[in-house]
Image: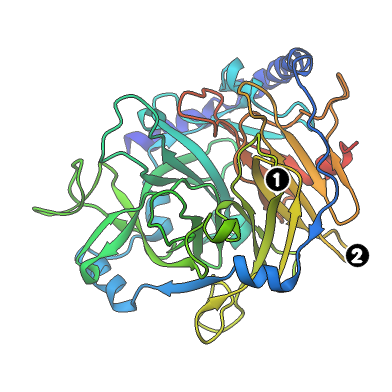
Amino acid sequence: MKQRGRHRRQRRGQALRATLAGTALALTAAATLISTSQATGSNSPGSLTPLSSAAAAGGFRLHENLVAADTLATLTRSMGGNVGVPGVLADTDHVMRDRAECSGTERAALPLEPVATRAYCWAGDDARTRQWRPASVTTSGDDGQWGGQRVMMAGWTHDDRTAGTTAGDRGLARIALIDASDPRALTYRWVLLVAPRDGGRDFGAVRSRMGGMVWYQGKLIVTGRGGAGPDDALLVFDLHHILKAGVNSGAVGRVRGGYSAHGYQYVLPAVGSYSPAGGTCGSSGGTVPCFGSLSLDRTSTPDSLVATEATGAGGGERTRIWRYPYSTGAGREGLLRSDSLGRVDADEAYTTKAAGLSGVLSHTPAGARRADWYVGHTPDSGGRHGTLWRQSGSRAEAVRCSGDQSYACWGQHTASLSYWQETGELWTLSGAGSDTTPERTLYAVPLTSVDGSLG
């Protein structure tokens, strides 16, 4: 009740924040004038080069591995039943700050062009943002409204490079489940990602870099590179099954008196994974790509999951981007299309000269025959704005800064991209560079504004 009272006080402050909005816009404009003088454009990556269907079927092939239904049922029963998304949203304990309440440093991380129409910063009193970094974003715009509520999720991973990191912290992955029903007062709660063990009688921590995340038909698919297991490229979670840990301790899993989740109250257990059929990522002479970022394309037929390869910002190799169609079969909601042997093949793949991609989005405009691919490029040196390119098989265009006509107009240290089809908004996160990066914002720009700023 105390927390809900705080939420109401936040709402009563909206009139003041509306007054401050004009000041915030002025500050943003000032930041634009300062930052554009420091921005440098990236060399054009040129048009996309298609890969043959044989190449796509080889290096990109995955194998589906699903957790037995009785395993999940055992864990759910042992932990007192499913609370689901509504249970967590009814128990949010942090309030996000809107743009007017963000610091000047946080606002400076927003894109120079196009201007963010909505921007939020994490709660200032949230100690759990320290030694962690945001890595991915998805919304109920991918999945539709959840019980009438608008919901967002941000994936965070523990930064192992920070001082004082313990073995228990290393590589942990979590999501911020955000109630976005009231755009003037977003609230959130942390949920730890876990994997069932011992037939559902226990669970362990999922360790992932969380570079990409997609919410579709009740399933959440995240990148598993970096700790979930050497053979797991993607991990699958069911948003209908969020469980509550009854013991508050630093342990993860079954303990005396119940279950603990490293101090988190809620856990989301994995229900499956997709492993590379050709070996671990980076193997076989580099033919098996490591997943970087993910997003959902609802303009393809059928709906599809698109992905980009994880590469360094300063690399000279071409980067691969590709898509997997979602299944349309009954009982396979939110899973990728597979054959009778559990094999999942990409049905489209390209290479791009862009390196260090921090996000990917595929979108086919109304009346067009082929998709445009939007890729975010992060500079290989810190403290600079990135570039957002739109590529196709015939061209490459980037948002151009009006101040100095360079292309470094996108946000700083941005994470994955997510398109909210109903509102036409493109969502992303800044501050994905490391846990020491203070410019952590969640923001949206209209996709039409991105297209209008291309030069």
The amino acid type of the residue labelled 1 equals Leu
Compare marks 1 and 2 and give the one earlier in the sequence: 2
Query: Residue shown at 32%/51% (left/top)?
Result: 266
Marker disc for residue 367? 2
Looking at the rendering, which quadrant does residue 367 occupy? bottom right
Q: Secondary structure at mark 2?
A: loop
Q: CA distance from mark 1 to mark 2?
A: 20 Å
Residue nearest the viewer, comparing 175 with 319 = 319
Give x and y (percent) for residue 334. Answer: 54, 70
Q: Secondary structure at mark 1?
A: strand
Residue nearest the viewer, comparing 154 with 275 = 275
Give x and y (percent) for residue 179. Answer: 50, 46
Looking at the rendering, which quadrant does residue 322 occupy? bottom right
The quadrant the N terminus occupies is top left
Which residue is tagged 1? 426
Outermost residue toward the bottom?
Answer: 340
The amino acid type of the residue labelled 2 equals Gly
Left or right, 246 with reference to 89: left
Query: Residue shown at 63%/24% (left/top)?
Result: 381
Query: Residue shown at 74%/34% (left/top)?
Result: 387
Residue 206, compared with residue 197, is above or below; it is above
Q: Is residue 144 visible?
A: no
